[in-house]
Amino acid sequence: MKPMTVLSMGIFLAACTQNPPISNQSVDEKTLAETRSVATQLVSTLGAALKKEIAANGAASAIGVCNVAAPEIAASLSQQTNWQVGRVGTRARNPNNQPNDWQQAALNTFAERAAQGEKFEQMETYSVSQLNNRPTLLYAKAIGLQPMCVQCHGQSAQISEDVKARLQALYPADKAIDYNVGELRGAVVIVRPL
Protein backbone atom coordinates (compact mmCIF):
# COMPACT_ATOMS: atom_id res chain seq x y z
CA MET A 1 0.00 0.00 0.00
CA LYS A 2 1.28 3.47 -0.88
CA PRO A 3 1.44 6.22 1.76
CA MET A 4 -1.30 8.84 1.55
CA THR A 5 -0.55 11.93 -0.48
CA VAL A 6 -1.31 15.37 0.95
CA LEU A 7 -4.46 15.59 -1.21
CA SER A 8 -5.73 12.13 -0.26
CA MET A 9 -4.95 12.88 3.40
CA GLY A 10 -6.99 16.07 3.21
CA ILE A 11 -9.91 14.17 1.71
CA PHE A 12 -9.47 11.48 4.35
CA LEU A 13 -9.46 13.95 7.24
CA ALA A 14 -12.53 15.69 5.88
CA ALA A 15 -14.27 12.32 5.70
CA CYS A 16 -13.25 11.52 9.28
CA THR A 17 -15.01 14.64 10.49
CA GLN A 18 -18.19 13.50 8.74
CA ASN A 19 -18.14 9.81 9.62
CA PRO A 20 -19.11 9.04 13.21
CA PRO A 21 -16.95 6.63 15.18
CA ILE A 22 -17.97 3.00 15.20
CA SER A 23 -18.75 2.61 18.87
CA ASN A 24 -18.78 -1.19 18.96
CA GLN A 25 -15.51 -1.66 17.06
CA SER A 26 -12.70 -2.71 19.36
CA VAL A 27 -9.00 -2.40 18.70
CA ASP A 28 -6.71 -5.26 19.69
CA GLU A 29 -3.79 -4.66 22.03
CA LYS A 30 -1.18 -5.49 19.35
CA THR A 31 -2.56 -2.77 17.06
CA LEU A 32 -2.61 -0.27 19.91
CA ALA A 33 0.92 -1.19 20.99
CA GLU A 34 2.23 -0.69 17.42
CA THR A 35 0.42 2.64 17.16
CA ARG A 36 1.72 3.81 20.55
CA SER A 37 5.24 2.85 19.50
CA VAL A 38 5.08 5.05 16.40
CA ALA A 39 3.68 7.97 18.43
CA THR A 40 6.51 7.55 20.94
CA GLN A 41 9.05 7.37 18.12
CA LEU A 42 7.84 10.69 16.69
CA VAL A 43 8.08 12.43 20.07
CA SER A 44 11.48 10.96 21.00
CA THR A 45 13.06 11.58 17.57
CA LEU A 46 11.82 15.17 17.50
CA GLY A 47 12.86 15.75 21.12
CA ALA A 48 16.38 14.46 20.46
CA ALA A 49 16.73 16.66 17.37
CA LEU A 50 15.54 19.72 19.30
CA LYS A 51 17.92 19.10 22.23
CA LYS A 52 20.85 18.64 19.86
CA GLU A 53 20.09 21.83 17.92
CA ILE A 54 19.47 23.92 21.04
CA ALA A 55 22.77 22.74 22.55
CA ALA A 56 24.70 23.39 19.35
CA ASN A 57 23.14 26.59 18.04
CA GLY A 58 20.50 27.93 20.45
CA ALA A 59 16.73 28.12 20.55
CA ALA A 60 16.32 30.43 17.54
CA SER A 61 18.05 27.86 15.36
CA ALA A 62 15.97 25.05 16.84
CA ILE A 63 12.83 26.63 15.39
CA GLY A 64 14.05 25.19 12.09
CA VAL A 65 13.78 21.71 13.59
CA CYS A 66 10.06 22.19 14.24
CA ASN A 67 9.61 24.02 10.95
CA VAL A 68 11.43 21.56 8.68
CA ALA A 69 12.59 18.44 10.52
CA ALA A 70 9.36 17.70 12.41
CA PRO A 71 7.28 17.38 9.23
CA GLU A 72 10.09 15.31 7.68
CA ILE A 73 10.13 12.96 10.70
CA ALA A 74 6.34 12.59 10.52
CA ALA A 75 6.50 12.00 6.75
CA SER A 76 9.20 9.36 7.20
CA LEU A 77 7.13 7.52 9.82
CA SER A 78 4.08 7.81 7.57
CA GLN A 79 6.01 6.29 4.69
CA GLN A 80 7.44 3.48 6.85
CA THR A 81 4.04 2.51 8.25
CA ASN A 82 1.66 3.47 5.44
CA TRP A 83 -0.31 5.45 8.05
CA GLN A 84 -0.69 9.21 8.39
CA VAL A 85 1.44 10.41 11.31
CA GLY A 86 1.57 14.01 12.51
CA ARG A 87 1.11 16.53 15.30
CA VAL A 88 -1.53 19.10 16.14
CA GLY A 89 -1.44 21.83 18.77
CA THR A 90 -3.92 23.39 21.13
CA ARG A 91 -2.92 26.73 19.61
CA ALA A 92 -1.52 26.69 16.09
CA ARG A 93 1.85 28.10 15.20
CA ASN A 94 1.30 27.21 11.54
CA PRO A 95 -2.22 28.26 10.41
CA ASN A 96 -2.19 25.41 7.88
CA ASN A 97 -1.96 22.87 10.71
CA GLN A 98 -5.30 23.31 12.48
CA PRO A 99 -6.78 20.24 14.17
CA ASN A 100 -9.79 18.67 12.46
CA ASP A 101 -13.00 18.02 14.43
CA TRP A 102 -11.89 14.63 15.79
CA GLN A 103 -8.45 15.95 16.77
CA GLN A 104 -9.98 18.99 18.48
CA ALA A 105 -12.32 16.72 20.44
CA ALA A 106 -9.27 14.65 21.50
CA LEU A 107 -7.44 17.81 22.63
CA ASN A 108 -10.52 18.92 24.59
CA THR A 109 -10.69 15.50 26.26
CA PHE A 110 -6.99 15.69 27.16
CA ALA A 111 -7.48 19.14 28.72
CA GLU A 112 -10.36 17.82 30.83
CA ARG A 113 -8.36 14.78 31.92
CA ALA A 114 -5.35 16.96 32.80
CA ALA A 115 -7.61 19.18 34.92
CA GLN A 116 -8.52 16.02 36.86
CA GLY A 117 -4.83 15.38 37.53
CA GLU A 118 -4.07 12.71 34.91
CA LYS A 119 -0.49 12.72 33.59
CA PHE A 120 0.13 13.34 29.88
CA GLU A 121 2.51 10.37 29.62
CA GLN A 122 -0.41 7.92 29.88
CA MET A 123 -3.00 10.05 28.09
CA GLU A 124 -4.32 8.77 24.78
CA THR A 125 -7.63 8.42 23.02
CA TYR A 126 -8.76 6.56 19.92
CA SER A 127 -11.78 5.55 17.93
CA VAL A 128 -12.53 3.62 14.78
CA SER A 129 -14.32 5.29 11.86
CA GLN A 130 -15.45 3.88 8.55
CA LEU A 131 -13.69 5.29 5.48
CA ASN A 132 -14.24 3.89 1.99
CA ASN A 133 -15.91 0.90 3.62
CA ARG A 134 -12.82 0.20 5.68
CA PRO A 135 -12.46 0.59 9.44
CA THR A 136 -9.77 3.14 10.26
CA LEU A 137 -8.14 3.86 13.61
CA LEU A 138 -7.99 7.50 14.68
CA TYR A 139 -5.43 7.81 17.48
CA ALA A 140 -4.15 10.74 19.55
CA LYS A 141 -1.44 10.84 22.24
CA ALA A 142 -1.17 13.94 24.44
CA ILE A 143 1.95 16.12 24.41
CA GLY A 144 2.70 18.20 27.50
CA LEU A 145 4.98 21.23 27.34
CA GLN A 146 8.50 20.26 28.42
CA PRO A 147 10.98 22.65 30.11
CA MET A 148 13.07 23.08 26.94
CA CYS A 149 9.93 24.12 25.02
CA VAL A 150 9.40 27.37 26.95
CA GLN A 151 12.24 28.94 24.97
CA CYS A 152 9.88 29.09 21.97
CA HIS A 153 6.42 28.38 23.41
CA GLY A 154 6.63 29.92 26.91
CA GLN A 155 5.38 33.19 28.29
CA SER A 156 6.21 36.09 25.99
CA ALA A 157 8.56 37.58 28.61
CA GLN A 158 10.54 34.29 28.67
CA ILE A 159 11.13 34.23 24.93
CA SER A 160 14.36 35.87 23.78
CA GLU A 161 14.30 38.62 21.15
CA ASP A 162 16.16 36.49 18.58
CA VAL A 163 13.58 33.70 19.00
CA LYS A 164 10.71 36.20 18.69
CA ALA A 165 12.25 37.59 15.49
CA ARG A 166 12.66 34.09 13.99
CA LEU A 167 9.10 33.14 14.95
CA GLN A 168 7.75 36.34 13.42
CA ALA A 169 9.64 35.65 10.18
CA LEU A 170 8.42 32.04 9.88
CA TYR A 171 5.02 32.29 11.57
CA PRO A 172 3.57 35.82 11.45
CA ALA A 173 0.20 34.53 12.75
CA ASP A 174 1.77 32.49 15.59
CA LYS A 175 -0.58 31.64 18.45
CA ALA A 176 1.60 28.95 20.08
CA ILE A 177 3.10 30.99 22.92
CA ASP A 178 2.22 31.76 26.55
CA TYR A 179 2.33 28.14 27.64
CA ASN A 180 3.64 26.95 31.01
CA VAL A 181 5.68 23.81 31.66
CA GLY A 182 3.34 20.88 32.17
CA GLU A 183 0.48 22.42 30.19
CA LEU A 184 -1.16 20.54 27.31
CA ARG A 185 0.64 21.62 24.12
CA GLY A 186 -0.96 19.26 21.62
CA ALA A 187 -1.02 15.67 20.44
CA VAL A 188 0.59 13.17 18.15
CA VAL A 189 -2.15 12.06 15.78
CA ILE A 190 -2.21 8.89 13.72
CA VAL A 191 -4.68 7.74 11.09
CA ARG A 192 -4.29 4.01 10.50
CA PRO A 193 -6.40 1.85 8.18
CA LEU A 194 -7.23 -1.44 9.89
Image (spheres, rainbow, N blue to C red):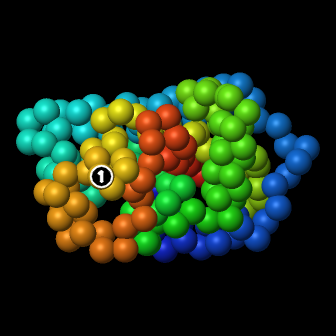
- In the rendered image, the vertical position of residue 123 relative to residue 91, given as above or below: above
Residue 100 appears in the picture as rendered: yes
The residue at the point 41 percent across, 58 percent down is 176
The residue at the point 58 percent across, 32 percent down is 120
Between 22 and 2, the residue placed more toward the observer is: 22
- In the rendered image, the vertical position of residue 96 relative to residue 111, given as above or below: below
* For residue 2, side relative to residue 69 (left or right): right
Image coords of residue 27 (percent x, y) = 76, 35
For this orientation, the residue located farthest to the right is 24
How many numbered discs? Answer: 1
Task: Kindly identify the amino acid type of the residue bearing the numbered disc 1.
Answer: Ala
The residue at the point 51 percent across, 29 percent down is 37
Between 7 and 182, the residue placed more toward the observer is: 182
* For residue 7, side relative to residue 15 (left or right): left
Image coords of residue 87 (percent x, y) = 47, 51
Which quadrant is home to the C terminus?
Answer: top right
- Per the image, the residue denoted by label 1 is 157
Between 98 and 147, the residue placed more toward the observer is: 147
For this orientation, the residue located farthest to the front is 157
The residue at the point 76 percent across, 70 percent down is 18
Image coords of residue 35 (percent x, y) = 58, 35
* For residue 35, side relative to residue 86 (left or right): right
Image coords of residue 9 (percent x, y) = 53, 66
Residue 70 appears in the picture as rendered: no
SS at circle 1: helix
- In the rendered image, the vertical position of residue 93 relative to residue 182, given as above or below: below
Question: In which quarter of the view is residue 30 placed?
Answer: top right
**Residues packed near mark 1 inside 10 Å, few (<14), some (14 to 19) or many (20 plus):** few
